[in-house]
Amino acid sequence: MKRNPLLVAAAAGAALLVPTAVSAGELTIGNMSATPNPVDVGNAVTVSNINDSGSTCQDGAVSWLVDAPDLSIFDMGTASTDGSGNWSFMFTPTMPGEYIVHASCEAQPGAFPPIQYLAVSVFAQAPGTTTSIAPTTTAQGSTTTAAAAAVVTPAFTG
């Protein structure tokens, strides 16, 4: 059986490239916050990155979307960054419930992988109600699952 040295070399080269491409595809995880949280329906919420070395978006734009309580998903477009790579955007909840905000940064147009931010929950409440949320935290890179407990007290309507 005759072997083509060019095909053998190409196959060996491809085998070496696969592990490199997989390890280069690890995502950087950034952090963001939402204020105020909880918020009354109809009032704006500001979502922004946490100003630390892993959460800024240098020379890029941040794309973001919001999952609403009724399971609608809204593509909110992009937010620009300042000279330090910090960014923020606003949205206004239209119904009570939990909104989940997702964001990612393309540091250079078409760069891979983009920076993915940990999703942040925004709790919207009917005007006149109060919501208390037990604070929870997780460290960046942690595998701990955090949950927030919410207590809602309805406003007197009678």
Image: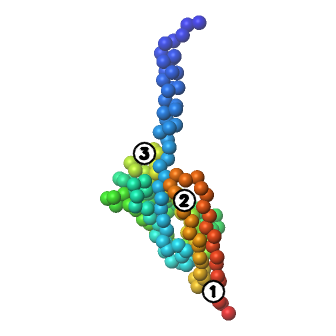
Q: CA distance from mark 2 to mark 1?
A: 33 Å
The residue singled out by tag 3 in the image is 111
Tags 3 and 1 in contact by the CB under 8 Å rule?
A: no
Q: Amino acid at mark 2?
A: Thr
For the point 49% across and 47% down, which residue is it? 27
Q: Residues within 10 Å of mark 2 (few under 14, many from 20)?
A: few
Query: Mark 3 or mark 1, which is nearer to you?
Result: 1
Q: Residues within 10 Å of mark 1 (few under 14, many from 20)?
A: few
Q: Amino acid at mark 3?
A: Ala
Between discs 3 and 1, the one toward the N terminus = 3
The residue singled out by tag 1 in the image is 155
Farthest top residue in view: 1
Q: CA distance from mark 3 to mark 2?
A: 28 Å
Task: Inspect this view and state whether residue 147 appears.
Answer: yes
Tags 3 and 2 in contact by the CB under 8 Å rule?
A: no
Q: Amino acid at mark 1?
A: Ala
The residue singled out by tag 2 in the image is 138
Farthest left residue in view: 83
Position of residue 59 measured from the top left corner of the image (x, y, whole percent): 35, 53
In this rendering, the answer to whether 59 lies above or below 44 is: above
Judging depth in this view, the residue of 90 and 130 nearest the camera is 130
Asked which secondary structure carries label 1, the reply is loop
Q: CA distance from mark 3 to mark 1?
A: 49 Å
Farthest bottom residue in view: 158
Query: Mark 3 or mark 2, which is nearer to you?
Result: 2
Image quarter in which the N terminus is found: top right
For the point 62% across and 64% down, which residue is it? 147
For the point 61% across and 67% down, which residue is it? 148
Between discs 2 and 1, the one toward the N terminus = 2
Q: Residues within 10 Å of mark 3 (few under 14, many from 20)?
A: few
- Left/right placement of residue 60 relative to residue 44 reads left
Image quarter in which the C terminus is found: bottom right
